[in-house]
Image (cartoon, helix red, strand yellow):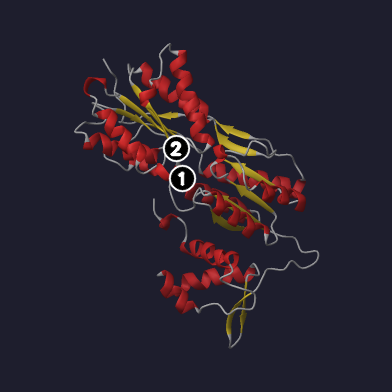
Amino acid sequence: MNNRRIPKYMQLKHELLSWFESGKLQRGQQVPSENEIAEQFGMSRQTVRQTFGELEKEGWLERIQGKGTFARNPERREGEQVKTIGIITTYISDYIFPHIVRGAEAELRSRGYRLLLSSTDNNKEKEMESLQLMTSQPLSGLIIEPTKSAEGNPNLAYFLELQEKGIPYLMINEKYRELECTCLKVDDEAGGYKAAEYLLEQGHIRIAGFFKRDDLQGVNRLKGFLAAHKAAGISASPKRVVTYTTEQKNTFPYQQALHMLSEGEERPTAFVCYNDELAVLLMEAVAASGLRVPEDVSIIGFDDSSLASASGTKLTTFTHPKTMMGQEAASRLIAIIERGETAEDRVYEPQLIERDSVAKRN
């Protein structure tokens, strides 16, 4: 979970493009020198030169001999085909997102398209800024991961503007319900169902579930979790179902887990976690409670991220297509752009990966 997974020149490109959107860089304004940028961001001059080169090719910057580098806006020459596709995701450098971006970038490069990146940090206002940035320049199309998809779409006007401009887009991981667009996603409800079902089959009765409620992935994983209990004729205890928001993810679930684990013989024997990131955090809660995984508490995550095999106890989890999703999203969007095709939705079936974090209960 660090920025080294995304090439540094792409990180810098994203930052400099945000300067255009915020007004920090205006047309005709001189850009700080390569040395100044390198020092400011702790990067090599070669990295800065590579970033400047890309922004110059895309029309954002121009070099004037003997004077320096200046800001400009990209202008599309009449008859020239735009060969740039934007990707807006909730995050770029963390968790599974570098894999999604790399998959898309490889496909786009092989088809002659440039990639423009932006992230929202799962914040609606930043989503608006990203959409403003993307729609302020010529684009062939957009790949978008909706921000807090369970909380509605206050940025609807920007999506309607995309449609009005004839800029095709598709969504990954989820989509806003009111929009008719292609979506590539995991069957999250099936994943939540399979997680609870698997633990029930291992003899666990007191299963706690932790799900993020401001995105539809979390809502659907919770729905499947509850459905598996119902199918087994077991009531999911309200004391053991925890929902939380993006802003609470590093504190609230952890605190709730500590509280549950202090309940002696009534404590849960298993946790189903919204994703691997949370699962690793709750492993720490188990250790802080003087208990062990999986001997005392079994844990299941989602997404088969690098975190799943990085900890001492390898995490039982569910697959997420990651790189394949990025590649297929790019491929399907290009089919829409170049051939006017109506791309089909894609729903990936999550598969259980059994590792060391689940034990049977007698």
Q: Which residue is mark 1?
A: 96
The C terminus lies in quadrant:
top left
Rendered image: mark on residue 303: 2
Q: Residue furthest bottom?
A: 66
**Label pair 1/2, CB-CB below 8 angstroms:** yes
In the displayed structure, does residue 138 sit left or right of residue 89?
right
Left-right relation of 273 to 337? left
Amino acid type shown at disc 1: Ile
For this orientation, the residue located farthest to the right is: 79
Tell me the CA gap for discs 1 and 2: 8 Å
Which structural element holds mark 2?
A: loop
Q: Which residue corresponds to the image point at 41% horizontal and 41% vertical from the top-left? A: 305
Q: Residues within 10 Å of mark 2 (few under 14, many from 20)?
A: many
Seen at 56% across and 42% down, the residue is 325
- The image quarter in which residue 273 lies: top left
Say what amino acid the circle numbered 2 marks: Asp
The x, y position of residue 310, in whole percent, is 32, 43
The residue that appears at 56% across and 52% down in the rendered structure is: 125
Residue 136: horizontal and vertical position, in percent? 67, 61
